Image: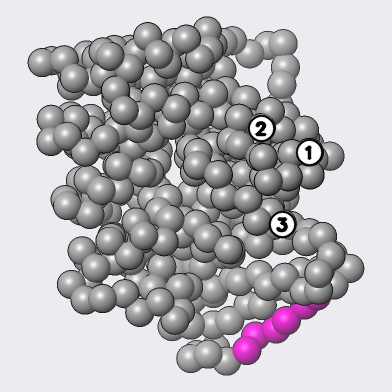
């Protein structure tokens, strides 16, 4: 089929979610639209793919096999973000979580949890060398939570991204890491295991940096797809009322019900869990993800989990909900989505 010819529309899960498949430039674009005011069910054709990539828990495994995740970020002003990302990675199912932060942030981050491995090297003269020696042990990298915008730290992050690309590991870029990408897109452009997770303001900055024109915000699906293509078809997760996930070829929207509460730190939960899902998706057999781009499968898993945590925390705490409350919901949310 060609153009925008309608292929088919099916209503699934008791009419709570409809999945419309449209053909655009001969490529299938998948979009989910919520129907009614009841509880939304997950897109039935995507969620099983996420489940397929979740590793089984067996006594035959060794520590670290299910995920060793690195977080690049954490400075004097911002210590919460790297903690949220790192602890979320652990609670999602990673075995080890490393935080590479500045010296003055390290003690603070360590005080939040003894579960994290904290490296106070991000602002040292030989920061890249200190981090590089750990890269062979890491399965994925999350760059940006609490990074700040000092030139020295951004330069270190850039060099670490370049070193990580040569190892072929998934790289999730969020927060101030996206500021770096907007300034120097080539740092991640074309890297197929790269995943960007912008909010609307960060997305606007990235779009305008790549297209040199103001963002037309009337069709976020199309502009997200255009940004992905401009970035070499790496995966973009545009966070918002619905989370739009695209690799430039396929577009998926996650409308799993969350809440109206938008506390700071939710994006760190998403990026940390995404680092884990990305490792699992790329470590699974191609059959597990049904031939779909593993980054899309991982992103759908992370966005669904974050929204479910937000919903559960809000039901308990209402307007008082914080990201710490959401993190406490990861266990039950994960079980509901991926193990029930």
Residue 152: x %, y % from top left: 13, 30
Q: Is residue 333 magenta?
A: no
Which class describes the residues within 10 Å of circle 3: few (<14), some (14-19), or many (20+)? many
Residue 250: x %, y % from top left: 50, 67
Residue linked to disc 1: 316
Indicate which disc, 3 or 2, sits on the residue closer to the N terminus: 3
Task: Locate the C terminus by quadrant.
Answer: top right
Q: Residue at x 48, y 91 (%)?
A: 3
Q: Residue at x 62, y 44 (%)?
A: 306
Indicate which disc, 2 or 1, sits on the residue closer to the N terminus: 1
For residue 257, which numbered disc appears in the image? 3
Q: Is residue 338 visible?
A: no
**Residue 64 as seen in the image, left or right of residue 144:** right
Q: Is residue 14 visible?
A: yes
Residue linked to disc 2: 325
**Residue 106 as seen in the image, left or right of residue 3:** left
Vertical comparison of 170 with 303: above or below: above
Marks 3/2: CA distance? 17 Å
Residue 207: x %, y % from top left: 29, 66
Indicate which disc, 3 or 1, sits on the residue closer to the N terminus: 3
Task: Locate the N terminus by quadrant.
Answer: bottom right
Which span of residues is magenta-colored?
6-12
Image marks 3 and 1: residues in contact by CB distance under 8 Å: no
| Element type at mark 2 | helix
Q: Residue at x 72, y 29 (%)?
A: 331
Residue 182 appears in which quarter of the rendering?
Answer: bottom left
Image marks 2 and 1: residues in contact by CB distance under 8 Å: yes
């Amino acid at each position: 089929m060609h153009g925008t010819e309608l292929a088919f529309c099916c209503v699934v899960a008791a009419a709570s979610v409809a999945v419309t498949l449209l053909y655009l430039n001969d490529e299938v674009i998948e979009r989910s639209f919520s129907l009614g005011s009841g509880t939304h069910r997950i897109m039935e054709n995507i969620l099983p793919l996420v489940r397929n990539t979740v590793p089984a828990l067996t006594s035959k495994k060794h520590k670290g096999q299910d995920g060793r995740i690195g977080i690049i970020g954490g400075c004097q002003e911002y210590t919460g973000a790297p903690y949220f990302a790192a602890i979320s990675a652990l609670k999602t199912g990673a075995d080890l979580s490393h935080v590479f932060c500045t010296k003055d942030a390290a003690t603070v981050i360590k005080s939040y949890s003894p579960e994290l491995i904290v490296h106070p090297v991000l602002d040292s003269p030989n920061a890249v060398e200190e981090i590089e020696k750990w890269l062979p042990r890491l399965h994925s990298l999350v760059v940006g939570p609490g990074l700040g915008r000092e030139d020295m730290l951004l330069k270190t992050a850039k060099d670490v991204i370049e070193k990580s690309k040569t190892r072929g590991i998934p790289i999730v870029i969020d927060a101030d890491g996206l500021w770096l990408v907007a300034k120097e897109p080539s740092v991640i452009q074309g890297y197929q295991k790269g995943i960007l997770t912008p909010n609307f303001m960060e997305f606007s900055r990235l779009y305008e940096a790549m297209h040199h024109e103001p963002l037309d915000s009337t069709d976020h699906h199309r502009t997200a797809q255009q940004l992905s293509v401009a970035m070499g078809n790496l995966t973009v997760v545009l966070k918002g009322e619905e989370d739009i996930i695209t690799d430039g070829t396929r577009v998926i929207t996650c409308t799993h019900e969350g809440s109206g509460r938008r506390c700071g730190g939710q994006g760190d939960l998403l990026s940390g869990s995404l680092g884990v899902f990305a490792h699992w998706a790329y470590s699974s057999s191609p059959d597990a993800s049904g031939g779909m781009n593993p980054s899309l499968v991982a992103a759908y898993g992370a966005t669904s989990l974050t929204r479910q945590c937000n919903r559960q925390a809000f039901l308990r705490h209402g307007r008082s909900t914080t990201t710490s409350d959401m993190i406490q919901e990861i266990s039950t949310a994960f079980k509901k989505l991926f193990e029930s």
